[in-house]
Amino acid sequence: MPDLTHGDDAAAVNSLRSAVMRLSRRLKHQRVDESLSPTEMSVLGTLSRCGSATPGELARKEHVQPPSMTRIVALLEAKGLVRLEPHPEDRRQKVVTRTEQAESMLAESRAKRNAFLANLVDGLDEDEWAKLRAAAPVLEKLAHL
């Protein structure tokens, strides 16, 4: 494992952190529904990627406390973006499922963000684009560690 506290490796880690944060901020501004917080959008994205889940499972995946997730789910339910259904095995729990409205909004949001990124990529040369394409799976892995 390289020493990530000194030299070129430390500079690369610093550059990566800075670039990911700036790009993330810019992507967050490419929203379709301004009434949803980034956290609410993230929960909808998690439900879309992973399928239905209990509020506790969502809290773990989103790295928030369960009471916070309960509030987020209630807000999303009030907006018609999720529905709560009985848990198939544990009647004390509920399962959170995204609605068609949520899926439609997520698709529109992804299309807008993809277009934004595609526009940025147009400014890259072929070699830069090839490197970025090759790095995408590694960045995806880092995002899920």
Image (tube, helix red, strand yellow):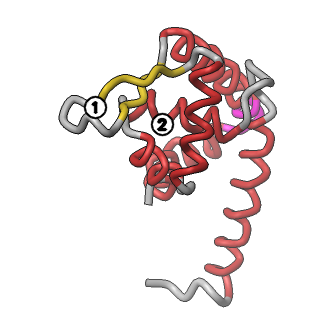
Residue 112, by quadrant, is top right
What percent of the width, then of the height, locates residue 72? Answer: 61, 37
Mark before the other along the chain sequence, 1 or 2: 2
Is the stretch drawn in magenta largely helix, strand or loop?
loop
Q: Which residue is rendered at x = 63% and y = 37% of the image? A: 126
Residue 92, by quadrant, is top left
Residue 48, by quadrant, is top left
Is 138 positioned to the left or the right of 40 in the image?
left
- Which is nearer the eye, 23 or 120? 23
Vertical arrangement, residue 63 with respect to residue 58, above or below: below
- In the rendered image, the residue lying farthest to the left is 89
Q: Which residue is rendered at x = 63% and y = 32% of the image? A: 41
Which segment did they paint magenta?
120-125
Considering the numbered disc 2 on the image, is that residue within a helix, a strand or a loop?
Answer: helix
User: Which quadrant holds the C terminus?
Assistant: bottom left
What percent of the width, then of the height, locates residue 63? Answer: 53, 56
Amino acid bearing label 1: His
Q: Is residue 10 magenta?
A: no
Residue assigned mark 1: 87
